[in-house]
Image (tube, coloured by chain):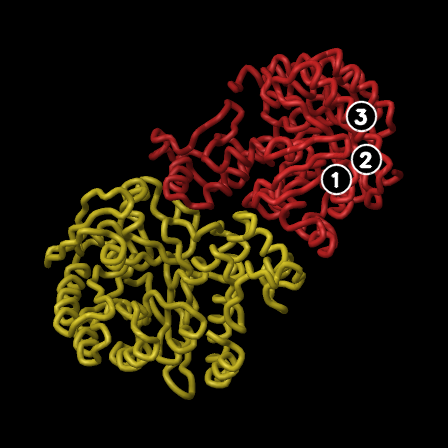
Chain colours: A yellow, B red
């Protein structure tokens, strides 16, 4: 995997926060990094040029969704996901495992893989580790994820144990399955909220030589304190020299807390999803722009924000767009929310570089209310 | 109205096609011109910079919609419609008359004006000529339209006559009502599909000194041949020195036919509306990109098209976006359809300039199927 490597540039004085860079064939990813989600080969409402302009260096796309629609065959024929969707920087594809468990119906899980019905049309499908790697190879992502079994919260100790053991067996099969040229495969640590099982999974997964490791099965319904506690236990068990990815987490507070516990990569639908309903993410917390109090508010979503939306539009106009069900509102809030989230990430990186992570984190939380 | 004037630059050798320019405080409008429609203070899915980048020099926005939502008071407080929506070039507002008749319910029409119920929430409202001008003054459009009574097709001779006579009485009141500074008001010729009534309305309306004249009540259900016939009779009755605006018409074939009959301005929701369902307008005619035949078609919507969509995306990708209900599809087709319509308009202008209008029109129709 010569084309893929991780450089650890600096660590925070206080703790485990890391500054680094991931080099890929399609460009650098400065870490800690936030990955906007482009579930169906599009970051909702935005062009790739806009997403890049907002500062994103990598996006995530979903194997499960693209497998069902349009199908990986069409994406491969198009020349891969990058060409299909016109995004030239790195793409990480998830394994499809989480979506199979959370979105599909009538699941039957065996060591072979998972039988399920499509959430789109009810049709029957099967995905196991080999199929997941084959789909991701067809998509041609830069980082592919090993096919895993996520234990939803709450989940019994026994079921969590069985899930992590199966995840390890699948990880091994994924590692040995064919990949796309230059494609890095990350292993995923499971173990639910059981410290012992987290340690067990981490030991098993890191025994396999993946170029990066993810922590899965957090932010799946458990209290945040429990997530932080498990993170705190798990990241020290991952090798220093490899990037660490906390899956499905991306609210501003979690970015700071995750980085403090040694995480390098994040993804989350939050910024793009809440934009649809007119919720803006700001340095003070959430702002629901549809609120009647903004009807005559001619100030931007957030004073001083440098995003296109805040430079050109008022809360009153944005509220009007949502009241009138105009899609431009969804788009303008998506721009703001991604800009905000990527700006938080940038501030985090600079604070590590400047040796001021703890001060900046404290300053952030003095202003922010989740 | 020093700030507003029309220069007639050239006429086609064969007939009545005109090349001109409308000068306004907010910039020039090269005619014949197509105006994209931004009904609710937004050209659906696009930013104003994108609309301008597509070549639009003026947009239309709807008085009826903005009166109901967000209300002209909010727009005025925002500094007018231009600032509210971030569009710096000219805006034409319609009078609200057509929408009151076509969208609202429980209408009662008197010489005073129209009592109606909102299509949004059923609330009761009244708009007459003075109210329409007051709303348009608050919006601060560059061109305001006189409040008129449109006769839908089919409509009896007697009702059409009554409607046009009322339109004339209203036009006079609109002309004398206060306007926004620099705002030009256009009169509207009615008369349905009755040549005699068209002549009567044209005589009455042009007797009033408006800086521009519109032809209303066409493209409201009558056959196209009937529309062309009425246009042919009506435009010679309008003064040479003023711009002529054919309301609500904008399919590519109608642009050529309208210009041939002396029209200078057009507006139509067609390009933006059909984009929503994945219909692309092309030089060959319509293309329904959702069609299964495009699933593996990796060519652009239209070969040789210079729009952002055609330069970067395939039919297969666009089809995927529509199948997956992704808003980017709507946006990319809006871009293409406006680019196409504005390109047709540009070709028409160049053909008049080059003295080749008839040849270019014939060439257009050899390729195009409506």
Pinpoint the chain carrying mark 2.
B
The reply to whether discs 3 and 1 touch (Cβ–Cβ < 8 Å) is: no
> Which numbered disc covers residue B174?
2
Q: Is residue A213 visible?
A: no
Mark closest to the chain's N terminus, 1 or 2: 1
Front residue of A228/A131: it is A228
- Count of numbered badges drawn on the protein: 3
- Same chain check for tags 3 and 1: yes
In the picture, residue B250 is in which quadrant?
Answer: top right
Mark 1 — residue?
Answer: B132
The residue at the far left in this view is A111
Quadrant in which the N terminus of chain A is drawn: bottom left
For residue B120, what is the image quadrant? top right
Task: State the residue at coordinates (82%, 24%).
Answer: B205
Crowd tier of the residue under label 2, counting other residues whose Cα lies within 10 Å: few below 14, some 14–19, many 20 or above = many
Of A297 and A312, nearer the camera is A297
Residue with the mark numbered 3: B168
Chain that bears disc 1: B
Q: CA distance from mark 3 to mark 1?
A: 15 Å
Q: Is residue A45 left or right of residue B10?
A: left
10 Å crowding of disc 3: few (<14), some (14-19), many (20+): many
């Amino acid at each position: 995997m010569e084309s893929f490597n991780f450089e650890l540039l600096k660590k925070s004085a206080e703790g485990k926060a890391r500054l680094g860079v991931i080099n890929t064939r399609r460009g650098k990813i400065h870490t800690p990094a936030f990955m906007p989600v482009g579930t169906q080969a599009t970051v909702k409402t935005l062009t790739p040029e806009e997403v890049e302009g907002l500062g994103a260096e990598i996006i995530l796309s979903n194997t499960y969704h693209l497998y069902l629609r349009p199908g990986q065959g069409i994406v491969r024929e198009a020349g891969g996901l990058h060409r299909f969707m016109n995004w030239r920087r790195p793409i990480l594809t998830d394994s499809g495992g989480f979506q199979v468990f959370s979105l599909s119906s009538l699941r039957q899980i065996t060591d072979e893989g998972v039988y399920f019905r499509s959430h789109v049309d009810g049709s029957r499908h099967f995905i196991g580790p080999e199929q997941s790697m084959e789909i991701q190879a067809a998509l041609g992502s830069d980082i592919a994820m090993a096919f895993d079994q996520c234990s939803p919260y709450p989940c019994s100790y026994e079921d969590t144990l069985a899930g992590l053991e199966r995840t390890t067996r699948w990880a091994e099969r994924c590692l040995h399955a064919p990949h796309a040229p230059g494609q890095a495969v990350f292993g995923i640590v499971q173990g639910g909220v059981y410290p012992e099982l987290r340690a067990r999974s981490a030991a098993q997964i890191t025994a396999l030589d993946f170029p990066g490791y993810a922590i899965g099965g957090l932010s799946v319904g458990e209290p945040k304190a429990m997530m932080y506690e498990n993170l705190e236990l798990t990241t020290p068990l991952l090798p220093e020299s490899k990037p660490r990815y906390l899956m499905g987490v991306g609210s501003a507070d979690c970015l700071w807390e995750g980085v403090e516990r040694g995480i390098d990569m994040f993804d989350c639908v939050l910024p793009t999803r809440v934009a649809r309903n007119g919720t803006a993410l700001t340095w003070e917390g959430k702002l629901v722009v549809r609120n009647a109090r903004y009807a005559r508010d001619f100030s931007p979503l957030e004073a001083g924000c440098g995003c296109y939306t805040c430079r050109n539009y008022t809360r009153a106009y944005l509220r009007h767009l949502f009241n009138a069900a105009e899609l431009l509102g969804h788009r303008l809030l998506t721009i703001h929310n991604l800009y905000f989230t990527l700006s938080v990430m940038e501030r985090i990186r600079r604070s590590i570089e400047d040796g001021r992570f703890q001060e900046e984190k404290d300053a952030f939380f003095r202003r922010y209310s989740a």
